[in-house]
Amino acid sequence: MKAKFGVNTDMIMVKVIVVAVLVIIMLFPIRMVISLIEEREDSQKAVQNEISQKIGGVQRITGPVLVLPYLTEANKIGYSYCLPDDFKVNGDINTEARKRTLYKSLVYQSNLNIKGSFSLPCFDKLNIKQEQIQWDDAFILLGIPYLQGIKNKIVFNLNGKDFDVQPGVNDNTIIGSGLTVNVTIDPSVSKFEFGFDLVLNGSEGLYITPVGKESKIHLKSPWETVSFSGDFLPGEKTIGKDGFDAKWEIFDYNRNYVQTWIGNNDLLKQSSLGVEFKYPVDQYQMTMRSVKYAIVFIMLTFVVFFLVELLSRKRIHPVQYLLVSCALVLFYTLLLAISEHLDFKLSYFISAFATVALITAYSKTMFKNIKQACMMGGFLSILYTYLYIILQLENMSLLFGATGLFIALAIVMFALRNVDWYKKKTTSETDIEKAAEDKVDNYMP
């Protein structure tokens, strides 16, 4: 059996308290680093919003919606709305990174072919007589929030006849921003087929409202880092190095609004499907995630120093603990600054290497032992490798992190298994104190 060795409990307790106070103090610079990350992230969002206002933000296409004005019994104009029977969209989306100063914004240009067909509603269900309909004043609405993003001359074809597209919306109770197509409806025609091309710029995401009784939407792009959002997920999708290819097929009974109505229809504005475009790595998000482990890193490093001090009986001054913790916090500032100019992986490697090299070199002056300094460098290398793996495992990060902390605690408990925490003082310490007391008594008159 291994013999237990004693420690000076009073001295250890004082050191533990000092180290705990240092850990609490380091919460303040960590909070400052978090504030710095949030400030830089806000600056990036401001640049992205500025670019969005000029190029186009998140585009949400709603319609086309056929609007049939009618004369009410009070001789006022009312509006009845009709959605397409079938609605098809085929789109190719090309992305581009726009950069201003240090910040980037992802924009896209979508080339959409939209077609489908209308049929006249059953006016009896709407409590409207056909004689009340103002057929010559009919129009079609197309909702687009950022009109500056339109990059082609839109020609709306209805039953083989081209109609001009007018800016703005005649009736904004359904669509707040968009285009109007003034058409003439022949009530003797049972079906109205439409089609048009739309080249639309935007940023961050593209959404489409499935207005058809049967909607078929097909979108593809060479950009692979995407997420599908909205009320409907694609029925078919492939995502790979060549980008993504997604298809939706939505029926009217999948939605919570009808095909024809009069008055308001707020549910139409709330139903959509689409895709969001993202960067493979958001350096601010990744840096923020890494900072959340800062206090754990400081505590683990202090534990290692404490073990070296305890087991090798070498004294480490609290100021040395403080300098090492400052180096650990500075890692995150380096990572933030470098990642704004270089790839995140390379930035992480540079920052981690610089931090590990600095602390290892400083450990040599503390331990006066190359082997112990190299062991400290190895420990920090493992620690930063462990953090990088956690950052890559978004879904498994909690499990991996909890497991790592459990293993770290087990190692510390194993290293301290032979410490006799109840032994107040060693024999040599008692002899030294007794000799000091005798010396003082000899000088007393």
Image: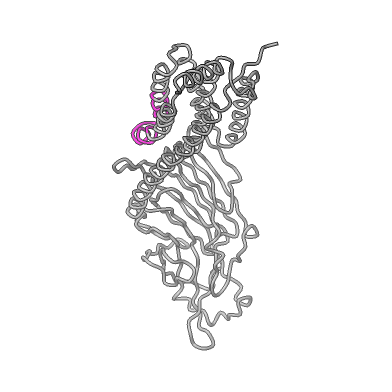
**Which residue is rendered at x = 51% and y = 18% of the image?**
438
Q: Is residue 212 above or below residue 107?
A: below
Quadrant of the rendered image containing residue 345: top left
Residue 433 appears in the rendering? yes
Q: Is residue 77 above or below residue 102?
A: below
377 left or right, relative to 127? left
**Which residue is rendered at x = 56% and y = 79% of the image?**
130
Q: Main secondary structure of the magenta part?
A: helix
The image position of residue 326, as x and y in percent, is 40, 32
**In the rendered structure, which segment of residues is drawn in magenta?**
334-354
351 inside magenta stretch? yes
In terms of depth relative to the viewer, which is nearer, 152 or 365?
Answer: 365
**Which residue is rendered at x = 44% and y = 20% of the image?**
443
In terms of depth relative to the viewer, which is nearer, 222 or 338?
Answer: 338
Q: Quarter holding the N terminus?
A: top right
In terms of depth relative to the viewer, which is nearer, 441 or 180?
Answer: 441
Instruction: State how many labels appear.
Output: 0
In terms of depth relative to the viewer, which is nearer, 303 or 388?
Answer: 303
The image position of residue 414, as x and y in percent, is 64, 20
282 left or right, relative to 269? left
Quadrant of the rendered image containing residue 412: top right
Colour pattern of the rendering = one colour
The image position of residue 305, as x and y in percent, is 50, 23
